Image (cartoon, rainbow, N blue to C red):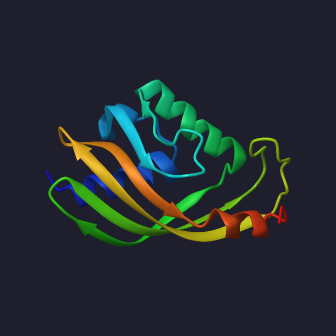
Amino acid sequence: MNKEILLREFIDEIWNKRLDKIEQYVHPEYTIHLDTTDPWEGQTLSHSEFKERLNSSFNSFPDMNFEITSAIPEENHVAITWILTGTNLGMIGEYPPTKKSINTKGLTIYHFKDNLISGHTQVFDRVTVMKQLGFM
């Protein structure tokens, strides 16, 4: 199995197209290893909890889109850099919708187990996002 191809499909079908195919890509135990301002940081999520996490993101940015700019596959990991765009049309925690667009970059290392995505480690410039939305 080519993990980079699987990951690219996951980003496109789950994050960009919002298809309900979680079980096809995500391990039943998905761990967020490092993502400091993610409410689920340090937790291991079931499929239903992973869907809850997705819906939280989609509620805030219904048109969110990830463009993968590079990928580095390894035996049990695939690292990607990406550009995230979207329009804030829903609440972000206690912050009201701004109807402003975001454009930011990040790096995610996806972990694999049993040929499924089992978690991630991520660096993401959320300060730029808060500035673009007018919260800072």
User: Which residue reaches farthest bottom?
Assistant: 69
Eyeballing the image, is 122 above or below 24?
below
Position in image of residue 5 (x %, y %): 25, 58
Q: Is residue 5 left or right of residue 26?
A: left
- Judge whether 4 appears above or below 13 on screen: below
100 above or below 54?
A: below
Q: Quadrant of residue 7?
A: bottom left
**In this picture, residue 65 sits left or right of residue 118:** right
State left or right for residue 125 relative to residue 15.
right
Residue at position x 50%, y 67% in the image: 106
Residue shown at 83% from the left, 66% from the top: 136
Which x, y percent locates residue 86?
Answer: 67, 61
Of 74 and 4, nearer the camera is 74
Q: How many marks?
A: 0
Where is residue 91? Give x, y as percent. Answer: 78, 43
- Locate residue 38 relative to residue 74 in the image: left or right: right
Residue at 78% in and 50% down: 89
x 64%, y 62%: residue: 126
Residue 63 falls in image quadrant: bottom right
Rendering coords of residue 115 (x, y %): 19, 42
Q: Nearer the viewer, residue 7 or 95?
A: 95
